[in-house]
Each structure stands twice: as C-alpha cells, then as structure tokens.
Image: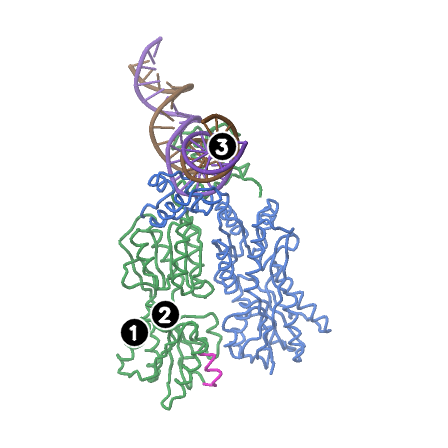
Chain colours: A blue, B green, C purple, D brown
Amino acid sequence: MMKKVSLQDISQSLNISKGTISLVLNGRGDEKRVSKKTQEKIIKFAQKHNYKANQLARGLSMGKSDMIGLIVPNISDSFYARIARRIERKARLHGYNVVFSSAGESKDRESELIQSMLDRQVDGLIIASSQKNENDIKRLKRNKFPFVLIDRHYPNIKTNYVGVDNIGGISAAVEQLITLGRRRIGFVTLKPGLEAIHERALGYTQTMEKHGLSIEEGFIKELDYENIEVEISNAIKTMVSSPTSIEGIVFATHYLTAAGLRELKKLKIRVPYDVAIISFAQMSAFDLIEPPITSVIQPVDELGDKAVDILLKNLRKEVKDYERFKLKTELVIRKSCGAQ
Amino acid sequence: MMKKVSLQDISQSLNISKGTISLVLNGRGDEKRVSKKTQEKIIKFAQKHNYKANQLARGLSMGKSDMIGLIVPNISDSFYARIARRIERKARLHGYNVVFSSAGESKDRESELIQSMLDRQVDGLIIASSQKNENDIKRLKRNKFPFVLIDRHYPNIKTNYVGVDNIGGISAAVEQLITLGRRRIGFVTLKPGLEAIHERALGYTQTMEKHGLSIEEGFIKELDYENIEVEISNAIKTMVSSPTSIEGIVFATHYLTAAGLRELKKLKIRVPYDVAIISFAQMSAFDLIEPPITSVIQPVDELGDKAVDILLKNLRKEVKDYERFKLKTELVIRKSCGAQ
DNA sequence: AACAAAAGCCAAACCGGTTTGGCTAAATCG
DNA sequence: CGATTTAGCCAAACCGGTTTGGCTTTTGTT
C-alpha cells in the first residue's frame, strides 16, 4: 500500500504549517485570512498529490466519525435490505457512511453490536431491535446518544421510533376478507415477543370482534420463529381440515405467508376457493404466484427516509424529546383473497 | 452524551502512566512485566468504569481501522443482500466491521464510494463493480491495497475474484431444455457490458451450437437494465408470437425472469406447455409460482465466505499474487422447464 | 558488601488531523 | 514618523490511543 500524503508531508514540502494547510483545505482560508497566493499553492499541491484527509484522524480530532450504525435482525431479509438501501443512500447524501450488522433475534448479539459500534464512535444508531434488549436502549437514552428505533420498538421506553401501523394494516386485511364474505378467518403469526406482532394480533382480534365474528379455538396459530418450516405444517393442516374449516387466513409476516403457501400447495388446497389468503408484508414475487397474493404493503422507503431524517435532526441537536411515527400501510388486492 | 472514560482518566485516577494501562488492557501486561497487583488494579478500575477503547484513536495509532468496505450495485437486491449478510457475519467473527454502499451501475458513484471508504481507512474492500471503473481497480491493484472483486470482474485485470460459473450455469439450463425436447430456445438477457452477462451469453450460444441448434433471428433479446419493464413486453411478444415460435426461454437474471413471467401471464401463455422457462439465479418465491420455476442457483453463501477468506489472507499479508474462483452453480429443476 | 541482572513502570514520541492564541511584518492612522 | 491596526502565518495543544527506550528500584550473585 502506497504511503498516502499527509498534512505533515505537505507542510514540509511547502514549508507552510500544518494548521494553515488544514484551514485552507477545509475552505476556511478566507475566514482565517490566509492569502490567496498561499491558498492556491496549497490547493494546487494537494490536488496534484491527491491529498485526502485521514478520516480516522479527523474523526478523533473533531469528536465525531461521520458514520452511523445500522443494526437489523437480518440484512438479507428483503424488508430490512430495502430499508438499508434507503438509509444508506440518504445518509451518504448527508456525508455519513453506514456500518451495518445483523443481530438475529439475539439480545446478546445485539448488545455486542451496539457496543462495537459505539466503540467505533458512530455518531448515531438506527436499530431494528430484538426487543429483548431494554438495557442497552435505556442506556443509550440515558446517555442522550442519538438513535432511532425502526420497525421494532419498546412501548415503555420513550424513544425515537418509526414503524408501521400494524393494527390498521391487519385490520384492513381482515376487513377485506369479511367484505368478500369470509367469516371463519384464521390468523397465522409468531409467538409473542415483538410489539409489532402483538399489534398485529390486536388488529386481528379487534376487527373480528368489531364484526361480531367469534374467534374459535384454533383460529390463531402462533409459530416459533426458529421453527416455522416444521410448525407451519400442523398449523395449516388443522386449520383447513377441521370439520368447520377456515375460510380465510391472514398471515402476520411475508415468510409465514411463503411457508403457508408451500403447505397449502402440498395439501392441494385451492386458494382462494377453499381458503382465501392475505399476507402482511410483501415479497418480491407475490404478484407472480398463482393466485397472486393480496398483501398489506409497508412503506419501506418512507420508513428508511424518516428514520434518517429523525436521526439527522438529533445529530444536529435540533431535538425534540423524541418522535414516533406509525406509517400507514396499503392493502394491495390481488386474487388470493377471493376478489374478482 | 456522557463523557466516556479515556486512558488519561484512568491514568490520573490511578496514578499510573497511560502506556502501562494500555499494555495491560491489551493483555500484554505479563509480556511487558507489569506486576500482578498493578494489572489487577487497572483491570478492576477499567471494568468498574466501563472503559472501552476509542477505535478511532486506536485505528489512527495502529494504522488500521478493522473495517472493511463492501460496495455492491444494490444492497436491496436479494442476491447482494444475502452476500452482504454472509460477509458481515464472517468479517465480524474476525474482528472487522463492515461499511457498505450501493453504487448502482454508475462508474462515478462507485469511484466516489471507493474513495470515501479509503478515506475512512478501511483495511480492505469487497466490490461488486459496475465494470466501468477500470481506473480505480487498477489503482487499488497498483497500490497493493487489499481487495477482492465479487460477482463482477475485469477479465483483463489480474485481481482477486470470486464469482460463479456463468457459462456452466447457463449451459446446464439450456441442456435441460434440450433434454426435454425443446429445440427452439431463446435467451433473454441484458445489454452487454458485464462480463458475467457476456459469459452467460457464451454459455447459451456454445450449448446451442454444440447441439447443432441454430440460433435464429430474434432468439436473443438484450434488454436495457434501466428499462426492463418496458422492453420485456416486446421481447416476449415477438418471441412467442412469431409463426415459428419459441419453445423455451432461458432468462439471464432473476429480475428478467420475474419481468418475463409477468408478461407471459398477461399474454396468457402457458408455462411450460407453450413455452418452458429456466431462470439464471434465484428469487425467494420461485418455488411458489405456478408452475414453480426451474432455476440455476448460485452458491451465495460460499461466495461471500470465499470473498472474506481471500480478503483476510491478504490482510494478513499471506498473499499469493491473486486468486480467482468460479463457483459451481446448481440447477434446481421444477416444473417450469417442462420436467415431469 | 558490591555489583549485575531483572523487575516494574514512566515519559515521550507518534499516528494525522483541528483549533486557538499570539508573533511578526505590513498597512493605516494621527 | 511613531503608534495602532490588520494581515498572514506559525507553534503548540489536543483528540485518545500504541509503542519503545530507559530510569529506578528491587532481587540475586559471589
């Protein structure tokens, strides 16, 4: 690796002090009244030798790194991947680079990652937390470290947060099925633990109740995230094979939908004739499946943008106490719900 | 933000020099014969006050940042997202954090990003290049900066590279269609520019020729990446509507497949009866589509792992000149190709 | 007891920037 | 023409670590 030129180098070659050079190269030459001649000389030399400031040194000196950390459960999940893309793009426009990590659903991993990023002196964090990590979140808050939670949050800790309207989203899905005449509607979801999941469950039960539909034994299936492929089989089987079988299913996440569809296919259940289906959250090929899948889509781009906006505000100290957003979802109606 | 404790702070509190403390906290206390008593005192104090080294300072001092940069065209593309996940995971196990950026297919953006990462003093780079950026790649090479190209590479520049066997992958796809009796086989791909695309085209033509099948006018469609949605329509229409229409199509990328399927659906072409289909590269719901899509799947995890392996070797200076890998693909046969 | 060897730690330089107070020389003022 | 002001730049401190040479003190040797 070729040695890079440093301020020292320029200083020696030009016989001008480091400080002056630094000022000039940061555009503060006029303000600090460095003569035009000197400025030109410095700038010309810097360009010629392709001088680039060492950001570590700069960061150390200025007490900020111009980096923001992004922690998500899994960057290869399309949902988080898209958010990441958006966040990175916007952050870069404001001069920040982003370092990311996937924490799985592990509290310890998440905790380590947060610490690791803090050690790296990131200026701020965007976290889709496992929601098992109250301690770190509280600590960040206590230390007034700039951060915003996305997608997952801790209802009891007052922090910046950008998520989606889970209740509304699921409600719309259930309503849609009801409108189309389905009354025995099931809900396939994850074991409780995440607030978002809790809210989606609420959305389901509230809407059912609102319409006077009873939620019978077996209407709700809570699967273990680690074990979906296995558990889905039973869940779907019992739902469709009961004597008074189910007419519609709302899935709480895209991967539950995918898993569910695989099982339905295996069982040769016809969608939507035998059972109608709606998915919360989107997968890229949902429109290609036969029948195309009706889904509640989340405003991913908006979510990413908003998160960065809030973080930037905090970094600039234009802080309100904290901000919370629940972005509206949109129901995209396709054949799987029985429409048309 | 609470002030963090620094070595200075510990030094003053304990009345022990910074240097000694640094040594002890880095586990070099014995080696540098610091007495047990002193070591304990230091460690206890550090733990109690939750001392964490400032990685910027450390990096500056040690001339390395323990960060690696990852540049891909688009992190929200499932292919790159999965690679990113893998890379990050493995890098972290070796003490590195990864900072990423999406460069689109823009040479300038890519160039900026590389520079930005170098300024940040990343220790190494993993790049899925636009392949329009010879200059930077050559410069990196000339400066002996550790980096490895993935997925996209420059055949004329001898660099580390991990990609997949594009020729073999497409070959297998074409062979499969031929085996199933299709002879008029088309190829939907992107406009030339990427080596991988070039290789896939080669795979197609070579295999066709090998089997004595002629490649007629209109068998190959090259679409503009920026304009796929629009161009796909014509491409598919002319392919299937010609008097001597096509019996099978191989798509060069997953998103071309998705776009193609949408069009086929619109035209009510029956897959695989009217036309059989195979996709190079995978999309998560390809098994759910009706019919399920036969696809050439790429060893994403292996690709990510290998890239990191090579990079780590370079970072440790265990360098051979350079290494190149073309990982084998796998053909997953499903109904869309007409099998069964 | 005298001296060498080993133990234990410190001080200082360094990494590469940023920022500030102040020195010197030129320009302006009375 | 001497006294101020202003322009133009430098030197030094600082950010928070790492690393090395060497000074003291203790221990060991004969």
The residue pinned by badge 3 equals B42
| Chain assignment, label 3 | B
What type is the residue that disc 3 sits on? Ile
What range is drawn magenta here? B260-269
| Chain assignment, label 2 | B
What type is the residue that disc 2 sits on? Glu
Q: Secondary structure at mark 2?
A: strand
* Quadrant assignment, res A195: bottom right
The residue pinned by badge 2 equals B330
| Chain assignment, label 1 | B
Number of callouts:
3
The residue pinned by badge 1 equals B202
**Mark toward the viewer: 1 or 2:** 1
Label 3 neighbour load within 10 Å: few <14, some 14-19, many 20+? many
Front residue of A20/A186: it is: A20
B233 over B75 or under it: above or below: below
A95 over B338 or under it: above or below: above
Q: Secondary structure at mark 3?
A: helix
Label 1 neighbour load within 10 Å: few <14, some 14-19, many 20+? some
Task: Confirm whether residue A193 shows in the render.
Answer: yes
Prevailing secondary structure class for the magenta stretch in the rendered image: helix
